Amino acid sequence: MSDLVHRTPGWSLPQAAYTDPDVFAADLEHVFAAHWLFAGHTGELDAPGRFLTVDVGRDRVIVVRGEGGALHAHHDVCAHRGSRVAPDVRGQVRAFVCPYHQWVYDLDGTLRSARLMGDCFATRSYRLAPVAVRESAGLVFVCLADAPPDFDAFAAALEPRLGPHGLADAHVVVRERYRVAANWKTLVENNRECYHCAGSHPEFSLSNFDVGVNGDVRTNPRYDRALAAARARWRAQGLPGEDVNFPDGAPYRVARLPLREGFLSETLDGRPLAAPMGTLTDPDVGSLRVISLPNLWAHANADYAVTTRLTPVDAGTTDVELCFLTARDATVDPDALAAVWRATSEQDWELCERNGAGIASRGYRPGPLSPVVEASVEAVLDWYVSALARPARRAA
Amino acid sequence: MSDLVHRTPGWSLPQAAYTDPDVFAADLEHVFAAHWLFAGHTGELDAPGRFLTVDVGRDRVIVVRGEGGALHAHHDVCAHRGSRVAPDVRGQVRAFVCPYHQWVYDLDGTLRSARLMGDCFATRSYRLAPVAVRESAGLVFVCLADAPPDFDAFAAALEPRLGPHGLADAHVVVRERYRVAANWKTLVENNRECYHCAGSHPEFSLSNFDVGVNGDVRTNPRYDRALAAARARWRAQGLPGEDVNFPDGAPYRVARLPLREGFLSETLDGRPLAAPMGTLTDPDVGSLRVISLPNLWAHANADYAVTTRLTPVDAGTTDVELCFLTARDATVDPDALAAVWRATSEQDWELCERNGAGIASRGYRPGPLSPVVEASVEAVLDWYVSALARPARRAA
Amino acid sequence: MSDLVHRTPGWSLPQAAYTDPDVFAADLEHVFAAHWLFAGHTGELDAPGRFLTVDVGRDRVIVVRGEGGALHAHHDVCAHRGSRVAPDVRGQVRAFVCPYHQWVYDLDGTLRSARLMGDCFATRSYRLAPVAVRESAGLVFVCLADAPPDFDAFAAALEPRLGPHGLADAHVVVRERYRVAANWKTLVENNRECYHCAGSHPEFSLSNFDVGVNGDVRTNPRYDRALAAARARWRAQGLPGEDVNFPDGAPYRVARLPLREGFLSETLDGRPLAAPMGTLTDPDVGSLRVISLPNLWAHANADYAVTTRLTPVDAGTTDVELCFLTARDATVDPDALAAVWRATSEQDWELCERNGAGIASRGYRPGPLSPVVEASVEAVLDWYVSALARPARRAA
């Protein structure tokens, strides 16, 4: 598959990577079906029978909390004639009863009963096809591969950092869905650089250091001092001081960044919308950024978190779902909660659509990435090209 | 073409049969363009020049009553530059005048005149390309093949059974059109089993024995007794007692089934909406079921009939037209007329769309058909696979 | 590429020429990307920084008036990551600032500045990819080819004939956009014959001789007399008497035709809507017809002009833009201005859609072109087939 996309280091990808249906099919097979995909939130699955569904291309996966508290994931395809069995996008059931011929599946996916199949029917040899599922620090992931890559190292990075934010007990207050006319990689690239932030994200730039405008974050003394001071404070609260940043080429990052002076959260005025979540006590924890490719990025502030999940539709179309979460007992104004990241996301989708249109045209050539502020785009393109070329492996 | 679809007896078809554009193209060529297709009703063509059109993929066929009473069918394509010539979906004309350059065609398709084509133009060597057409017992069929399969055996089965229902003199009171997001075979399979009836069709199940719930109809004593008694009554009226059921693999069925006790028609309360149609005198004639693959099923009660016609659009999309017919002189409430079969059909389309979505996903595998209640699905899949593999032949 | 479309002289093209995605791709490459395309009007580009955009398939070209008055054309694709840079479909700018990362391009397309690209970045080695552009007599053309075919001979035909109409100083009063469900060639063929005019264009036929109804224009004495008289009058005004009609197979025509007696313009009542445009003094100049394949036809009357521009979308879809222009200082009723050609165009799109539907169906076969009134269709099909087969060349 590596023959599909040739990349020159330092330059953006060739046009076919964003427009060719064959590359898109390879993306679904070698990236989306081979890696862990963010599916939803532990808080949406807080009782036996609570389920959610997640689409990957034409596939739909059911994730459901089992009777004993374990999570199960299944293809949403009846073993009889192939009908969808989940009664809705999310909800709660005692069992999955196929609406077509009433085959009944236990929450763990085993076939409990199938009427009128004759005396020789071996009920227990049928089931909903299983899908790998894991949860960590309140985030739920599935993997369509028969032999999923390692998840443990990611969980080991995530739990001490995101765990204290209490997402496992949070609930989704605002959910936004978008259809973006651009390849999924264009959205990922957009997320991986802040070169565009000063020009496009006024709300985001209120609370966040714009590392692009000030040059490489590693050589900006003002930012360095803020970070050093913040990390000392965070360590004092028991939060790890070091970030995890695409270790050994694995496609994830967990990094805590300070906010600008006077900002305790990514809100318009810097004031938190609610008391700190989970086991946090000090609101001054900056913003924890979680990325898990190919389909998740999230920001966790002390008072709220926001997750962004990508679903590729075709080479030129990507669906996006944003979820804004708070502690269950918090009462927040939904518009204040979504103010910064709804605006920022919608600005990004417009940039991505303009970028996608240009990439698809005859005048497009791979262009030079900035060594100053687009090194993270470079890294993610390296990962993508290697993911197409070999079986998926997360660092163990 | 048989290489396109491999089928294991006892199991549903592989995914490609429902989703692969190449299989769909073969379906259009080897099934739809090779077999007789239901086009419409004799009652819609009750005077010279009355015409209707029927779409098959990108093709449109005109069926028109000729001056002498014979039916003609033509491709709706002008022999000059290819324009559509029929002025509407159905209507009445004296001749077909192409709206582009006014070439004039007689009802039998021959070119009557073409202005400004020069002195050497051989008008009579041009015509609308002909299509085979037949009518029987009020139903009109066309066949796009150059050498259509036999029609006579089907007509011989149809006329003594459906003829007395008087469809040739009936009119269409209600017409419903649907676009269903599923392969046409999924709709056919749905029609060929009542395994799903008890769970999904409350209106239908009022008047119909649900052979699925009670097991194989051939071994259900209660149903057997009702059928035997009914057949005796029908024979006394001159109606044939035996059914015709896919004889020698030919793709049609004409079968009269008894309704549940107290039901004289497939209505919500069992009462007929009108006097018996045609030459019927006794309203107690059960429900005559006509199937002609690939695109027709119909139920004829004593008081009304309903036809269902499929038009494949692409691998995952099928258009459907339902027509509800009564005797011309009957006055019926259109909503009462359509109550049972409009509801039943819409329930089926929802089942088919859920089935189609699951079949199209990675988790789909062919599943086991019930030997008890899905033998008719098995039979129709056998017919389909063999139709793909060899030139069409109806039993002679 | 010539293997894609085989044509029999005297007959319309085979179905694949209108429906096959591979032929459509070849049309984009060998016809649209190889020839001069009409882009817009000089009057829309009347000051430095005034720009318009023109779409060709997935490509968008910016045409902009430079500081010194020269025209520039560029692919609308940033040299960095490929974003669209034009801020709107048309407008006025001092420079093109990419909305993504604020790279700044001068009007001539050179990169003026790119922030945060590091010390080694060679700003001046980047630019918006250039596109060939020419203007003549108020019409602006672009060519996507690296080595465009000759433009000068076309300009030499155009300027003495269209120049006096003053389009360079005209403005667009009415702009209409349509999406037509037919191949672009079906629209061109429709334009190249008036066989259909008497049957379909009552408004057009008020002012125009219908050469189709009266047979070959070259042998119609009444028309011949009107033409001879008109040409004498036009020569007296300094307008060339001879037409230019696809010289040496080049794909353009510039021809002045007389209007019917009593008509001084293509209006409903024959009265001009305004004083003669440009340097014309006598309103009796007939109607100057300009065709430049593959995407322009225009009629210039003394008082107004109308241009029609085609944009192919896919094999079965074409976008069309009509512009109605008058002198800047004229005041006209927009509905009176558009009355004849809006109606005529909409009648044509309906004919084209009916034609396209028939061409796409199984019953279509190439049909005979009229030697009397479709010789121009024959000529344009010859040109098309040869354009597919060899590099584009306009007569020098």
Image (spheres, coloured by chain):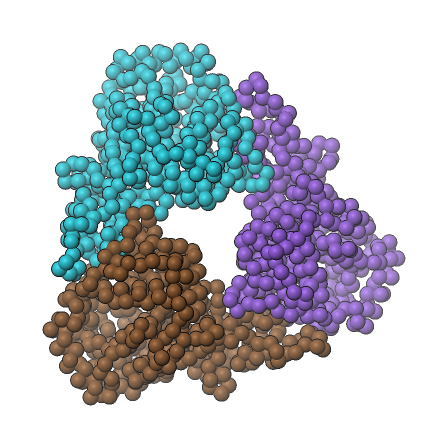
Chain colours: A brown, B purple, C cyan
Q: Position of residue B53 (x, y in %)?
A: 61, 42
What residue sits 52% from the left and 36% below the top?
Answer: C14
Q: Position of residue B134 (x, y in %)?
A: 72, 42
Looking at the picture, does residue A130 appear above or below residue B338?
below
Looking at the picture, does residue B246 appear above or below residue B85?
below
What residue sits 57% from the left and 47% below the top?
Answer: B57
Residue furthest right as drawn: B236
Is residue C292 rendered to the left or right of residue B228?
left
Looking at the picture, does residue C226 appear above or below residue A307?
above
Residue C275 visible somewhere in the drawing: no
* Image quadrant assignment for residue A248: bottom left
Residue furthest left as drawn: A221
Q: A383 or A78: which is nearer to us?
A: A383
Is residue A311 rendered to the left or right of residue A247?
right
Quadrant location, the N terminus of chain C? top left
Quadrant location, the C terminus of chain C? top left
